[in-house]
């Protein structure tokens, strides 16, 4: 990719200019978490695709095939959640190296089946190709009522910025797994030392999409004004919403939610906790904005953390505990730079 | 894949048993050219995915990137045609090796754009992943009026078997291109000797989906009783329709349509022409059955060739010019065996 300086987002943007991307039924194509089309009166269809590729997105020495299937499906579903929609069908394309046994593929499919049950979606089709590496590309089709759809654009000054769950755990889990792999490579008889890190490892291996949040927000009558999932990390998510909405963000460091294990991993690996929370990525939590009036309703919702506010301009900044304000860099867990980033951190 | 004895069709069948594949909106999942769901009153939605993978499905020494993009999109669209439907949107997932330049990717996208224009579809989304090899997985969404949908099942005894266009040309084109590559590898200054084979080469490099046939059949009021595309070849197509419909087929060898260049290639490479026509594959012509009454209407349609009839039982046979009847083997251009087949023929 031209000396690896081009990110996936930039590249897709540049390439999509080559395309027409126009259809009478298409409301919005490339550029959000999912494409949007007219399904029927009052309902939009949604479609998105996500790929997990061996070596870049997973390592078979610690990612069991069942979890790879699970994660690939969840990661696709998460894009539908980010549009405030409901996932329906999955189409599973698989690249399979020679030597892969049918029982290994069955493990992979068992993971996808678990997603079918948990998220009430159905695998509707797919194909299998021979390949040098294992990869899964899952397309998901969903739907959403027209009045409930949420795009990346729509955030306006003085609205509240919210994030679900806690941040940085999948990245912390990856660091622990990588360390265990290194130890085992050196001494195959070593016992894995992961008992204190069960939570972050689970978040890395078996993430969940926040369809529960989408349902709950609807129940309490709150439609976010903008939303994105955190597959590329909080920093990248904030910048995407900022650019799409033409606004800036002011975030409070002390409001960022994290699990105690995440903090312990940051300490253990001497990575600044702030960096883990901002740039960790691979998490399928939701980042969204709501009108200021939603404050009263949301303060009683345990899954939502109000972490800052929307501001005019286009700066995305974070305020630390002593009132210092810093810019949040526009970097993320970019899939094209993923390997390099994993190596360099 | 367990000593490569498992075909893609068998494997998908076995794996899909692990899945639930159930949803209130889903009419039919895995098992036909596309999955079918309830779109709105009187309309079904269709979705299917197709993958082209370097080394197995194309060779960059003679498949230009623009054509690879074109062919991947056409191959996906063809699955919608095979359901008698109309393609609408494409979702393009791309695996891109390091070192691929943005301009190379643009070429690929230019091919896809040509499909957007020609077939009036829109690329609605997609993603790009780093990969060791180049691959494209394209998901296509389409729709069809409920009363016009055609499945693989539905053929009944004494109906007529039809095929569109001519057979074997893409395979013949591949043989010519492979020969030219071998010559050029041996003598880089050699001039390619392909001028007599323009038609079959074009059919290999730049195939077309038969959306025109779908439209024309509707115009003349004919709904096929069963249909499939010939991406895996005529033999595989016949067996798929036979199994899905619970019938057999009687085909007349002398009725199989072919181009004179295809016959010349068969002669040149000393491959029996019958084998090229039956097992060639990679063609996006349609194979379908119609009620006997359609005979009068179809005999004036230049794109349709009536090649035999549906019979009771489950035998799929071909009758040669002197009245001998032979079984048609159930083999095809199977993507998982593709490489081996290419090498061995």
Image (cartoon, coloured by chain):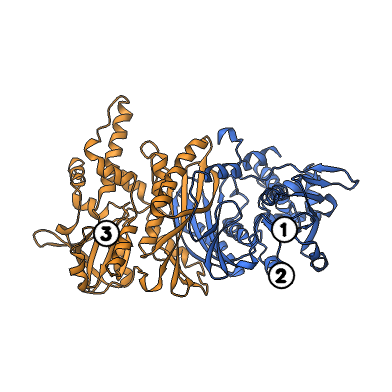
Chain colours: A blue, B orange
Q: Secondary structure at mark 3?
A: helix
Q: Are marks 3 and 1 on the same chain?
A: no
Mark nearer the viewer, 3 or 1:
1
Residues under numbered marks 3 and 1 in contact, where contact means CB atoms less than 8 Å apart: no
Please name whichever residue, B342 or B215, is drawn nearer the observer in this view of the structure. B215
Which residue, given by chain and number where applicable, does mark 2 sit on? A216
Q: CA distance from mark 2 to mark 3?
A: 53 Å
Residue A193, how many percent across, how many down?
74, 51
Whether residue A189 is situated above or below residue B26 in the rendered picture: above
Query: Which mark lies nearer to you, 1 or 2?
Result: 1
* Chain identifier of the residue bearing label 3 in the image: B
The Cα–Cα distance between marks 3 and 1, rounded to whole angstroms, is 54 Å
Q: Secondary structure at mark 1?
A: strand
Picture coordinates of residue A114 (x, y %)?
58, 66
**N-term mark: 1 or 2:** 2
Q: Residues within 10 Å of mark 3 (few under 14, many from 20)?
A: many
Callouts 2 and 3 in the same chain: no
What numbered label is drawn on residue A121? Answer: none
Q: Are marks 1 and 2 on the same chain?
A: yes
Q: What residue is disc 1 on? A: A288
Where disc 2 sits, the SS reads helix
The answer to which image quadrant residue A44 occupies is bottom right
Q: Quadrant of residue B244?
A: bottom left
Query: On the picture, is A161 further left or further right than B43?
Result: right
- Can residue A100 be seen from the camera position used here? no
Q: Is residue B343 visible?
A: yes
Categorize mark 2 by other alpha carbons within 10 Å: few (<14), some (14-19), many (20+). some
Residue on which the image places disc 3: B235
Q: Label 1 marks which chain's residue?
A: A
Along the line of sight, which residue is nearer the eye, B225 or B114? B114
Q: Quadrant of the C terminus of chain B?
A: top left
Residue B128, x across and y down, in percent = 54, 46
């Amino acid at each position: 990719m031209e000396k690896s300086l081009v990110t996936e987002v930039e590249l897709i943007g540049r390439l999509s200019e080559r395309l027409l991307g126009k259809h009478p039924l298409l409301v919005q194509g490339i550029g959000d978490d999912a494409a949007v089309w007219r399904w029927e009166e009052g309902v939009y269809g949604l479609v998105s695709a996500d790929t997990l590729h061996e070596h870049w997105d997973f390592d078979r020495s610690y990612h069991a095939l069942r979890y790879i299937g699970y994660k690939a499906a969840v990661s696709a579903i998460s894009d539908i959640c980010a549009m405030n929609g409901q996932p329906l069908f999955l189409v599973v394309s698989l690249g399979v190296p020679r030597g892969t046994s049918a029982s290994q593929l069955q493990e992979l499919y068992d993971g996808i089946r678990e997603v079918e049950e948990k998220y009430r979606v159905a695998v509707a089709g797919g194909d299998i190709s021979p390949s040098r590496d294992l990869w899964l590309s899952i397309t998901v089709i969903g739907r959403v009522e027209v009045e409930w759809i949420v795009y990346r654009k729509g955030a306006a000054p003085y609205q509240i910025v919210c994030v679900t769950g806690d941040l940085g755990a999948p990245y912390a889990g990856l660091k622990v797994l990588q360390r265990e792999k290194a130890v085992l490579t050196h001494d195959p008889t070593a016992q894995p030392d992961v008992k204190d890190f069960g939570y972050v490892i689970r978040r890395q291996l078996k993430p969940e999409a926040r369809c529960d949040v989408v349902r709950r927000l609807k129940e309490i009558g709150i439609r976010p004004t903008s939303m994105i999932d955190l597959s590329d990390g909080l920093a990248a998510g904030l910048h995407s919403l900022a650019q799409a909405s033409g606004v800036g963000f002011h975030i409070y460091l002390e409001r960022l939610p994290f699990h105690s294990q995440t903090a312990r991993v940051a300490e253990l690996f001497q990575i600044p906790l702030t960096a883990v929370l901002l740039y960790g990525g691979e998490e399928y939590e939701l980042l969204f904005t709501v009108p200021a009036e939603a404050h009263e309703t949301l303060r009683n919702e345990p899954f939502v953390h109000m972490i800052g506010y929307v501001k005019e301009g286009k700066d995305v900044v974070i305020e630390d505990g002593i009132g210092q304000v810093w810019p949040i860099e526009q970097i993320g867990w970019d899939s094209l730079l993923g390997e390099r980033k994993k190596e360099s951190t």
